[in-house]
Amino acid sequence: VLEVKDLDKSVKFWTQGLGMKVNRTRGNQAFVSFGPETLTAADGGKFALELVENPSTTQDNSGQFFQFALSNSLRVNRVANSGGDITFGFGYFEITAPDGYKVVVYIENRRDPFDLVGVYVNDVDAAAKYYERVFGMAADRSYGDKEVGRFEPARIKGSVLMTYGAADENTGILLVPKSSSKEASSVQSIKIAVLDKDVNERKEKLVAAGLTPKFTGEVPGTGGTKVSLAVPREGVPLVFVDYNDFEREQPKPAVLTIGEEIQAYVAMAKDDEN
C-alpha cells in the first residue's frame, strides 16, 4: 500500500514505465500488477501495488525499495516519459519513481516479475526472528552473502530474505541493515497485504505471540472486506486480508479483441519512437 500525491501520474509510471497493468480501482485507489491478482486465474496470484492518492502527503519514502525482474529489456525512454528518473544503469537499473519511491530493475524470467520489497531496519537479526515467530515467515539468512552476476543487483551484506513459500515463486520482504544506506529511513511508509483464511483467527494468533493488531474488522468502502493490521516492533506493517473477501473484489478477466490488441501494440510502437 503506497501513498501518492497524484494518482494519474503514479499509474502512468508503474504502467507505461514498468509495464504493469491496472487490475482494479476503488475510489481514490488503483491496484497495479504484472497480471491477475486472483488465485483462480491460470497465471494469477501476482503481487500488486495499491496506490492511494493523498495530495497532501509529506511522508518520507526512503525506508523501502521495490525490486523487479523483467523478462525483456527496460525501455529507458518509457521510464523517462512516464516520470521516472534513472539514477544508475550499468547491468541493472536504479530508478526514482514519482513520490520518491526507489525501484531496482534487472532482466530475468520470473513467474511474477515483482521480486521483493526491501525494507531498512536497525537490527536485521532481531527483525528476522520476530517475523519468523510472530508472522510464521521463512528466513533465508544466506541471501545477502550470495554472489550474483554483474547484470543483477549486488546483494547487500547482512540482509535476510523473508518469504511465505518458495522465494522464486513469491514476492519476498528483504530486511536490509540500515547501516548500509545513510540516506534511507528505518521507518517504512508502506504496508504489505497478505492473504489469510480467517483474520479473526489471525488476530488471536498474533495476540498469543505478543502482538496486538492495530485494527481488525471491515474496511469502510470495500463492501465488507475484513483485515487485521499488524505493526511489528521494527520493519514493515502487514495487513492480513480475508481471502474470500479479496476474491470477491477481483474483476472478471478481460479478453481483448484482435483490434484492441493491435491498437495496444501500435501505441507501444509510437511510444518507443518518442
Image (cartoon, rainbow, N blue to C red):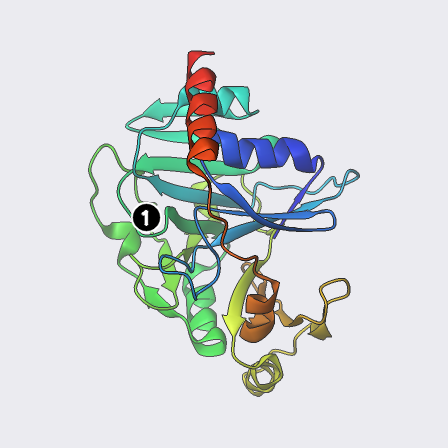
Q: How many marks?
A: 1
Picture quarter containing residue 200? bottom right
Picture quarter containing residue 7? top right
* Residue 7 as seen in the image, left or right of residue 155: right
**Residue 19: x %, y % from top left:** 45, 36
Q: Does 193 appear above or below 150?
A: below
**Residue 117: x %, y % from top left:** 46, 51
* Residue 186 as seen in the image, left or right of residue 88: right
Q: Does 203 appear above or below 123?
A: below
Q: Amino acid at mark 1?
A: Lys
Of residues 78 and 64, the one nearer the viewer is 78
- Residue at horizontal 75 percent and vertical 43 percent from the top: 54
Of residues 59 and 111, the one nearer the viewer is 111
Q: Does 269 appear above or below 114?
A: above
**Residue 150: x %, y % from top left:** 22, 32
The residue tagged 1 is 157
Of residues 178 and 172, the one nearer the viewer is 172
- Residue at horizontal 51 percent and vertical 37 percent from the top: 102
| Secondary structure under the numbered disc 1 in the rendered image | loop
- Residue at horizontal 25 percent and vertical 51 percent from the top: 145
Q: Does 187 appear above or below 100?
A: below
**Residue 70: x %, y % from top left:** 34, 38
Q: Is residue 75 visible?
A: yes
Q: Is residue 232 visible?
A: no
- Residue at horizontal 46 percent and vertical 70 percent from the top: 131
